[in-house]
Image (spheres, coloured by chain):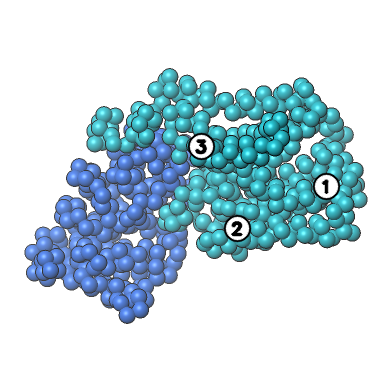
Chain colours: A blue, B cyan
């Protein structure tokens, strides 16, 4: 197993409150790792430390051997660390397919002049982007609504669209922030399916999740957080049987 | 739900509007006709102005110059969703540079235009570089400031701008030996420039560059998460729109033959905003139809003399309430597409 991401002693303090307290774990270069924990355990703060939305008070985030702790989000994305958002942030004025096309930004080239003059190389590139967008929309089951404005899609579909858009950036590690929040059982099942497919294609996945069914169905490794501290780590079945975890969840 | 989206989807927009099966033949045919409508109306107005000449031709020429200005503003405000209160500064720099260089120094119009464009872009870069990195309203405030400063300079720097007196005797639009004289030639030249601008924007919108601007408009956070350098794209958008503004300023002084500070005052910004919102923010045809309608609207209400402003204001408010995407958006709605 090669390490893709390692979180080393991540700590975040807000004044006297310690939201994340000395958390360390590694994400391997394959499979699905899940971070779980009760409400207010510090999951989202931890996620933000990793994705670069906020800097940690102490500790490091190392991606593929490089310290990326203080890099801005766009620099992390350029290295292959791509996230989705808990509250979907789609580009409302663009169609589903165009949203996914934005995801290919890092993997394509071309500025204003090439847009206006549209030489053959750019035409070919655009055709490639369109084909790739369709493929990804089909993967998440949104092929039928490719030309609909993102804002007109149901919430569940918007979540899936966000996953497709993130995949278009060809991440090495995909960070999913509570991807099942607000999904019904059927949509959640489809999402599990998509997450397994993503992992099978060689992208490692780190997800923060509340929905235990999704975690048990998809994760290979589970990190449990409570009161900002890591209280357990292991395979889903192991973690489920861990007395400390049961205590944290049942109070 | 994904197995049979057409029957079980909860996604359908407002009742009777966008359904899952978009683009049934009849509907896309209707959309095509309605989509062409603003272009046909614009063509009709410009054609009538060319045919009738006189006062109508003058108003339509002004409208076309504003269409260039608003097309540029739309790149920044519509496609990138930023706000600028100071694009009149770039029009003033373009206009005054052209006026001074073609009269005092007898430069050909094209060379003077290039010099004005360079000046406008330099100022846009100077103001945009620091402020576009900041979140919030810093840029808007900054642009408001340069609009006012440039106006003051036009008033005070009398040795060059001749202050309130203005500069007159500016030659007509021309390249080499060709010179656009008479209403029809001027309208033809302006129409060609407006169409070229619309073409550039249409191409831009469906490109990697244009999608990046839309991403910045949609969510800066999500754009950054996908590796888009938000500050860079905002600056590019600002420079582009400043370029259009500079061109509009140059066109104005050549068409009118005279320039004074009030031409590029704050009222230019207010007028341009109105045109942009009425025509349709973030659409290709919006700035053109908005410029034409807003230029002709006061003339339409002129008969009611005392009620002119009232009618004008009421028409604007109704448009903004019922067609927040402007007239171009209204047509989208009518065609059964969701406007946003």
Chain under disc 3 = B
- Residue A38 drawn at (x, y percent): 20, 64
Farthest residue, direction bottom: A16
- Residue B123 drawn at (x, y percent): 70, 58
Q: Is residue B126 left or right of residue B322?
A: right
The image shows residue B302, relative to residue A211, as above or below, that is above
Q: Nearer the viewer, residue B313 or A161?
A: B313
The image's mark for residue B323 is 3
Sequence-earlier tag: 1 or 2: 2
Local SS, label 3: loop
3D distance between C-alphas at marks 2 and 3: 25 Å
Sequence-earlier tag: 3 or 1: 1
Q: Residues within 10 Å of mark 1 (few under 14, many from 20)?
A: many
- Residue A5 drawn at (x, y percent): 32, 65
Q: Nearer the viewer, residue B159 or A7?
A: B159
Write down the residue under mark 1: B259
Write down the residue under mark 2: B140
3D distance between C-alphas at marks 3 and 1: 35 Å
Local SS, label 1: strand
Sequence-earlier tag: 2 or 3: 2
């Amino acid at each position: 197993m090669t390490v893709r991401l390692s979180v080393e002693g991540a700590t975040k303090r807000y004044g006297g409150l310690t939201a994340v307290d000395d958390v360390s774990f590694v994400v391997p270069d394959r499979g699905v790792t899940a971070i779980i924990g009760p409400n207010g355990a510090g999951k989202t703060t931890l996620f933000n430390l990793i994705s670069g939305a906020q800097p940690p008070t102490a500790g490091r985030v190392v991606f593929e051997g490089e310290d990326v702790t203080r890099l801005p989000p766009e620099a992390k994305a350029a290295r292959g660390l791509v996230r989705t958002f808990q509250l979907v942030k789609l580009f409302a004025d663009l169609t589903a397919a165009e949203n996914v096309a934005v995801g290919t930004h890092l993997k394509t080239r071309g500025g204003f002049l090439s847009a206006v003059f549209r030489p053959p190389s750019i035409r070919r590139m655009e055709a490639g982007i369109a084909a790739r967008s369709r493929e990804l929309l089909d993967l998440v089951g949104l092929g039928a609504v490719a030309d609909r404005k993102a804002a007109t899609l149901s919430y569940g579909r918007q979540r899936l669209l966000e996953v497709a858009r993130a995949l278009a950036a060809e991440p090495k590690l995909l960070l999913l922030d509570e991807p099942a929040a607000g999904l019904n059982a059927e949509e959640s099942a489809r999402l599990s399916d998509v997450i397994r497919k993503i992992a099978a294609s060689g992208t490692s996945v780190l997800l923060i999740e509340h929905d235990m069914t999704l975690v048990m169905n998809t994760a290979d490794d589970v990190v449990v957080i409570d009161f900002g501290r890591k209280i357990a780590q292991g395979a889903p079945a192991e973690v489920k049987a861990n007395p400390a975890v049961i205590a944290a969840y049942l109070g | 739900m994904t197995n049979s989206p057409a029957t079980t989807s909860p996604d359908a927009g407002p009742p009777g509007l966008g359904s899952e099966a978009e683009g049934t033949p009849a509907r896309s045919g209707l959309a095509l006709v309605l989509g062409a409508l603003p272009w046909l109306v614009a063509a009709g107005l410009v054609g009538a102005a060319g045919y009738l000449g006189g006062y109508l031709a003058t108003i339509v020429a002004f409208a076309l110059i504003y269409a260039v200005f608003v097309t540029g503003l739309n790149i920044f405000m519509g496609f990138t969703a930023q706000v600028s209160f100071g694009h009149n500064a770039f029009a003033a720099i373009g206009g005054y540079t052209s006026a001074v260089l073609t009269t005092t120094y007898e430069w050909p119009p094209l060379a003077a235009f290039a010099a004005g464009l360079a000046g406008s872009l330099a100022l846009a870069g100077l103001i945009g570089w620091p402020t576009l990195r900041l979140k919030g309203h810093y840029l808007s405030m900054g642009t408001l400031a340069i609009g006012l400063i440039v106006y003051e300079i036009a008033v005070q720097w009398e040795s060059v701008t001749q202050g309130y007196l203005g500069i007159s005797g500016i030659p007509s639009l021309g390249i080499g030996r060709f010179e656009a004289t008479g209403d029809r030639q001027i309208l033809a030249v302006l129409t060609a420039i407006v169409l070229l601008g619309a073409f550039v924007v249409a191409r831009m919108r469906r490109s990697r560059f244009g999608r990046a601007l839309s991403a910045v408009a949609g969510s800066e956070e999500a754009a950054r998460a996908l590796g888009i350098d938000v500050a860079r794209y905002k600056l590019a958008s600002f420079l582009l729109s400043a370029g259009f503004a500079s061109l509009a300023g140059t066109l104005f002084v050549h068409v009118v033959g005279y320039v004074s500070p009030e031409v590029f005052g704050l009222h230019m910004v207010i007028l341009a905003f109105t045109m942009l919102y009425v025509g349709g923010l973030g659409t290709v045809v919006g700035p053109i139809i908005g410029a034409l309608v807003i230029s002709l609207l006061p003339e339409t209400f002129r008969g009611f003399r005392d009620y002119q402003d009232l009618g004008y204001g009421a028409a604007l408010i109704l448009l903004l309430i019922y067609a927040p995407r402007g007239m171009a958006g209204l047509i989208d709605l009518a065609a059964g597409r969701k406007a946003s």
